[in-house]
Image (cartoon, rainbow, N blue to C red):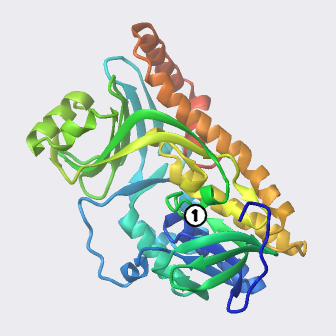
């Protein structure tokens, strides 16, 4: 069925106010954030997730050295506080107290310090599995309709929203459907929503590394000729490594013996953070800038990586996604207060307008960093070093950058 046409609601179809496609970090965060609207307005919400992730919420927690982690800003932590999940989430979080940005082979650096902004931390690093576990524990206490494991087989416009047919045979009619599936399902494309993709011809090699000394809450962003290397503090003396490679160059390092890998990482990064003593499982992910040309239609919203996938250089992907979650909830609440249904075109247009500037600013900043530090030029290298020194000396400018990194300003 082509976009814009509708089909009638058929018997055996369950009608819900909101259907969230994807129960991962973004979808689960949205479901948690909707809790006040569920209580006040009696909204019916369904979550469709292909993986049996609900089982993880009740299983014994076993911290893993190899666990993937995400850097969340202070603003994101405040949003999680509003949802009532931050105290438990903080149990496995490592605080980022300082951020150190430098370029290999050049003098000059920019340092952002939590003390300068009178905050306890600029952000935190949380294992993704723990974050998901805490969110799903919260969801078990909400009156949600769970379809898990299940997946959307077909989606099509219907009168008053969208109709979804699931693999299990269930059929849903949703006044508002939110695609929060990371863009992996192809649903967005089936609805005719195109995306603009700009491959960076780069691959991120991600692993946990153990350091020879305590990291003291310092996050490192080190620009090298090969690409940026980020080290994010984890609990204990472990750090999350995000090492950018030219596409294809990562294959050799994925296969290196541990000692050889650590030696090459030490040579690339330097000794500022200490010695690298151990590395966990290594994973590689191709990098590109992907932005959906549409993020809303009447009865439809697109969130998270389905709407925008960023380079990890600035660590803003999940933080941008969560601000989208909170802005959508705020727009829905304003619409409901004005007597408008959740899938109302005007409500979703207001949400899209609310997101536009933040989305453009973060994309421009992340993409600009990749391209600026990706140019191999001695003259430009000196200019970048001077810029880092100048930024470090300019207190107000540095503090403004820190507040933006913390998600407190857009």
**Neighbour class for label 1 at 10 Å: few (<14), some, many (≥20)?**
many
Left or right of 330? Residue 401 is: left
**Which residue occupies 55% across, 29% down?**
368
Q: Residue furthest right?
A: 338
Q: Is residue 207 above or below residue 297?
A: above
Position in image of residue 376 (x %, y %): 40, 15
The picture places residue 78, in percent across and down from the top left corner, at 58, 62
Q: Disc 1 marks which residue? A: 180
The quarter of the picture where residue 339 lies is bottom right
Tell which of 76 and 98 is nearer to you: 76
Quadrant of the snapshot with the C terminus: top right
The number of numbered discs placed on residues in the rendered structure image is 1
Please state the horizontal and vertical placement of residue 156, each as a whole percent of the image: 69, 69
Q: Secondary structure at mark 1?
A: loop
Observer-nearest residue: 87 or 55? 55
**Does residue 73 show up?**
no
In the rendered structure, the answer to whether residue 272 lies left or right of residue 23 reads left
Q: In the picture, which quadrant includes the N terminus?
A: bottom right
Q: On the picture, is 134 further left or further right than 21?
A: left
Q: Residue at x 67, y 53 (%)?
A: 193
Q: Nearer the viewer, residue 289 or 156?
A: 156
- Can you say whether 90 is above or below 386 in the image? below
Question: In the image as oriented, which residue stretches furthest toward the bottom?
Answer: 12
Vertical side of 287 occupied by 228: above or below: above
Task: Tell which residue pokes out farthest to the front in this image.
Answer: 1
Q: Where is residue 181 shown, x and y percent of the image? A: 53, 63
Q: Is residue 46 among what the camera can see? A: yes
Q: Residue at x 37, y 79 (%)?
A: 56
Out of 409 and 189, give the one closest to the viewer. 189
Q: Quadrant of residue 399?
A: top right
């Amino acid at each position: 069925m082509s976009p814009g046409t509708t089909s009638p609601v058929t018997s055996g179809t369950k009608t819900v106010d909101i259907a969230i496609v994807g129960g991962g970090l973004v979808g689960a965060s949205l479901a948690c954030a909707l809790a006040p609207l569920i209580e006040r307005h009696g909204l019916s919400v369904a979550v469709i997730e292909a993986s049996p992730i609900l089982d993880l919420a009740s299983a014994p927690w076993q911290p893993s050295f190899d666990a993937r982690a995400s850097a969340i800003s202070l603003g994101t932590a405040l949003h999680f506080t509003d949802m009532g999940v931050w105290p438990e989430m903080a149990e496995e979080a490592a605080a980022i107290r300082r951020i150190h940005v430098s370029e290999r082979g050049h003098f000059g650096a920019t340092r952002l310090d939590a003390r300068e902004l009178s905050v306890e931390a600029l952000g935190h690093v949380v294992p993704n599995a723990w974050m998901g576990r805490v969110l799903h524990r919260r969801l078990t206490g909400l009156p949600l309709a769970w379809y898990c494991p299940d997946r959307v087989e077909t989606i099509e416009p219907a009168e008053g929203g969208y109709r979804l047919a699931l693999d299990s045979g269930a059929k849903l009619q949703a006044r508002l459907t939110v695609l929060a599936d990371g863009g992996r399902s192809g649903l967005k494309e089936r609805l005719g929503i195109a995306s603009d993709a700009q491959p960076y011809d780069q691959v991120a090699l991600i692993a946990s590394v153990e350091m020879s000394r305590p990291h003291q809450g310092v996050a490192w962003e080190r620009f090298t000729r090969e690409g940026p290397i980020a080290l994010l503090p984890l609990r204990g003396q472990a750090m999350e490594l995000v090492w950018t490679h030219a596409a294809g160059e990562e294959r050799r390092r994925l296969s290196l013996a541990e000692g050889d890998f650590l030696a090459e990482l030490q040579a690339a990064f330097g000794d500022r953070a200490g010695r690298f003593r151990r590395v966990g499982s290594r994973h590689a992910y191709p990098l590109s800038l992907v932005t959906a040309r549409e993020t809303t239609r009447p009865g439809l919203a697109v969130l998270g990586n389905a709407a925008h996938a960023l380079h990890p250089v600035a660590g803003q992907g999940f933080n941008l996604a969560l601000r989208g979650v909170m802005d959508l909830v705020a727009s829905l609440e304003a619409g409901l207060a004005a007597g408008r249904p959740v899938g109302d075109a005007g409500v979703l247009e207001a949400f899209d307008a609310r997101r536009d500037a933040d989305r453009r600013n973060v994309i421009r900043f992340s993409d600009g960093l990749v391209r600026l530090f990706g140019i191999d030029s001695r003259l430009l290298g000196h200019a970048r070093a001077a810029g880092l020194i100048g930024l470090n000396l300019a207190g107000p400018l540095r503090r403004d950058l820190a507040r933006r990194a913390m998600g407190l300003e857009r």
